[in-house]
Image: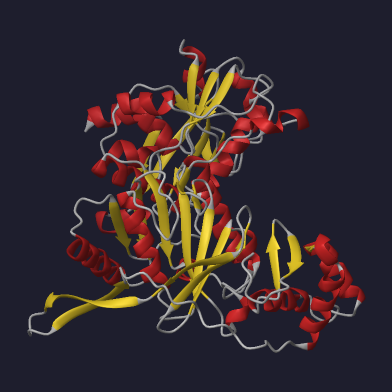
Amino acid sequence: MAGKRWVMDQLGVRREFNGAKTKGAKQAGIFYIYEDENGAPYLRVKRTPDKQFIQYHLEDGKWVLGAPKGPKIPYHLDRLIDVANNQIIVAEGEKDTDALWKIGYVATCNPGGAGKWPDELCRWFKGRDIIVMPDNDEPGLKHAALVERKLKPVVHSVRIAKVPAPHKDISDWIAAGATADDIAKLIDGATAPLDDEAPSRLTYFDACGAFVRRPSILKGLLVRSETSAWIGPPKSGKSAFIVDMAVFCASGREWQGHKAKEACGVLILALERADLCKRRLHAYAVRDGLKGLPIAVRGGVVDLMNPACVDLIIQDVREVETHFDCPVGLIIIDTFNKSIAAGGGDEDKARDQNRVAVNLRRVHEQLSVHIALVGHTGKDETRGARGSNAHLGDVDVMVQISGAIIKQAEVTNANDQPERVLAQFKLDPFNLGPDEDGDPIMVSIVSAEEITTAAPKASEPKLTKNEKTMFGILHEAGKAGMSTEQWNNAGRAAGIGHGRRADLHDAQTGLRRKKLAREYQDRWHVNHRQGEEA
């Protein structure tokens, strides 16, 4: 016991039990001692079992509740001054700091936890090489950015090293078996911040021709680093259609007239009915004699509103790539709506949809993949995706699926490709064999039969009052057409959108659904022949 106390004394850690043994667990606390540059005790921090951090200062040789009135100092300041090592790890808390010292690293942290880094701490780090190791959550990343910003003017270098998921912090990772060599590798891959010597982020006009070409998975449809949405009403076949696409992408085959540029791995986040997704994939294996396709299905709920989902998705992708020795090119999320509900969000709120969009952009920043989102249309299918229309602005391609027996997939909105009918298809029932009672296990998958019959032409569409007005404005623009902004301004001048701003969007969407208007690269034109391909 004396030896254990000696080690705790060397680390500045005090474990205190108050009262009888039966009450000790409730009163237990871990104490961390901050010593000044001369090695004298200066601040004591108590970490309670419910992770509260209580500060004490010395008065007449006794610890008194409250922080010292003097300047803030970093943890283990006396050691930082004594060590010759120029590299210092800035952790998020005392527990992480001590864990790093135990395996041979020079480390420190600030009192008060995440989000607190007073300027007076910076003077102790002048000229040093700093590695910031935050906790694996949003407050931790924000704290790392704060420390980086504060230290950048005074240190030699500052980088951020994120602990690999699913570990929540450096202590958790070390407790799980991480070694000093693992920490060294993490440091080697630390991210360097922008500094004055870094290349400019600005691209000037004459250099714009040197843009980076994003590789395609399916030429003219699926591009890496982009996002698509595949929407339709319940039972419309959208999930079956997207699984069909996954099979063709994984096997490197042309799909719906689009040339496969590569065979890539596919990760399906099946937030709804993962078992059905697996049955469909098995049906393809049996029907088409497929084996070993680089496809993985992740069941269960994933909260895409939580920033932690980014590391979770990246971890899954790396696992799939290791298993198949094949890079993942396509991530399917089925359904987008469920991913918002998982975080307690509301798909009708642009705020909640935007939180998911930000996290998906973070995935794009770290992975060269295409993300395909499966979603629902509202009660009025002509208005597109269910919920806030913020979703429309966050995807590069929107595909809507409709129809009863013969179904139609139509590109209704896209940044760099025309609106058009993508495919016509039907679903075939497939027998996977008998269950325990001898009854067939049936699943529906996209038919291998090519649909050659043209979709039935609609009768003369009926227009609302606003649609008639907006169509007349667009028609008068002639061949030049109108940008969305020009059309909206003209619509407002005609009295549309004053009481309800969505009236403008609804009229435009209605005209597009009725094949009377088409949009390409934010330019609207009249379809002079109804049903004409954009």
Residue 25: image x %, image y %?
31, 55
Task: From the top left corner, tell me how far across and down residue 312 is, in percent.
Answer: 39, 50
- Colour treatment of the image: secondary structure
Identify which residue is drawn at 92% across, 74% down: 493
| Camera-side residue of 23 and 136 | 136
**Residue drawn 69% across and 67% down?**
518
Give the percent coordinates (x, y) of residue 133: 47, 34
**How many marks on residues?**
0
Q: Residue furthest top?
A: 84
Q: Could one spot residue 344 in this view of the protein?
A: no
Q: Where 347 sits versus 243, above or below?
A: below
Q: Nearer the viewer, residue 385 or 314?
A: 385
Quarter holding residue 209:
top right
Left or right side of 173 for 53? right
Q: Position of residue 234 (x, y in %)?
A: 44, 81
Q: Quadrant of the N terminus?
A: top left
Which quarter of the figure is the C terminus placed in?
A: bottom right
In the image, farthest residue toward the right: 493
Vertical arrangement, residue 482 with respect to residue 207, above or below:
below
Quadrant in the rendering for residue 500: bottom right
Residue 106 relative to residue 24: left or right: right
Q: Residue at x 62, y 80 (%)?
A: 382
Looking at this view, is 210 or 269 the one in front? 210
Note whether residue 157 is visible.
yes
Q: Quadrant of residue 243?
A: bottom left
